[in-house]
Image (cartoon, rainbow, N blue to C red):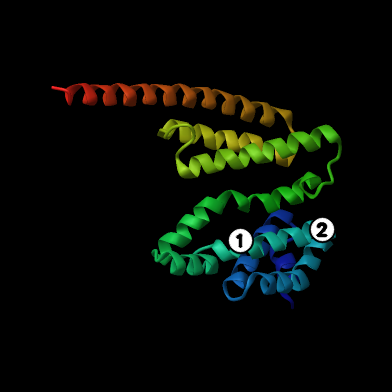
Amino acid sequence: MTIGHAITGLSSGNLLIALALTMVTCIVFGTVSVTMVAYGLTAIIIAPALVSMGLSLLQAHFFVLFFAVLSAVTPPIAMNALGASSIAGSNYFKTSVTSWSICISAYVIPYLIVWNPTLLLQPPDLLSGILTMLAVILGLLAVNIVVTGYYMSPLNALQRVLFGLCAIGLWGYGFTLNYTFLIAGLLLLVVLSVWQKTGSKRSKLILETTSSDKEGGGQF
């Protein structure tokens, strides 16, 4: 029995489970080989199984390619982080975790490719294609804001949670093309941007006032 047959059998025909098993397999292959070898193996062994479950050839190959690439920044091996830490003279494990956290939003993209062909430049119509690209890009922005904890100014705990919900709303549209998700995500993003802008101005004013006080105190 090949790995492709094993994935098909273990998933019992459930596409999401099959994709999750494929993701893990791609990452495991990528930890012991270079990206192109990992992609070549999964393209030959697993991609046909995904095609048999209803994916187009392009979707199946993009899915395994994405995770073959992401395996290079996935702990605990993270081969790219190993090279980067050697060059920078930094801690290997910390470098791998940091690189993984920065790239974490990219792990959703292959699933979006499966559920929404717009990312393969095959939109069902022009409007949904434009809105999908907007939602995906803003969703990536929202997730990275949550990960870094900073937008226009540092985020508090509530803002991080709300940005997380914003990303869910925006990507929810990408998966379902349901306008409710899109509207909710965009509204949250606008509200949080105004909130952050106000906080940024207040912080700048406090900093300028403090600096002025110090300069004034130094004249005596």
Q: Residues within 10 Å of mark 1 (few under 14, many from 20)?
A: many
Determine whether, in the image, residue 151 is placed left or right of residue 56: left
Please give left or right for residue 130 compared with residue 108 in the image. right
Q: Residue furthest right?
A: 125
Q: Earlier in the sequence, mark 1 or mark 2?
A: 2
Please say whether residue 209 is visible from this viewpoint: yes
Most distant residue in the left direction: 220
Describe the element under mark 1 as helix, strand or loop.
helix
Tags 1 and 2 touching, CB below 8 Å: no
The residue identified by callout 2 is 58
Q: Is residue 172 visible?
A: no
The residue under the point 69% across, 71% down is: 36
Q: Position of residue 214 (x, y in %)?
A: 22, 26
Identify which amino acid the numbered label 1 is placed on: Leu
In the rendered image, the vertical position of residue 126 relative to residue 83, given as above or below: above
- Residue drawn 78% across the image and 60% down it: 60
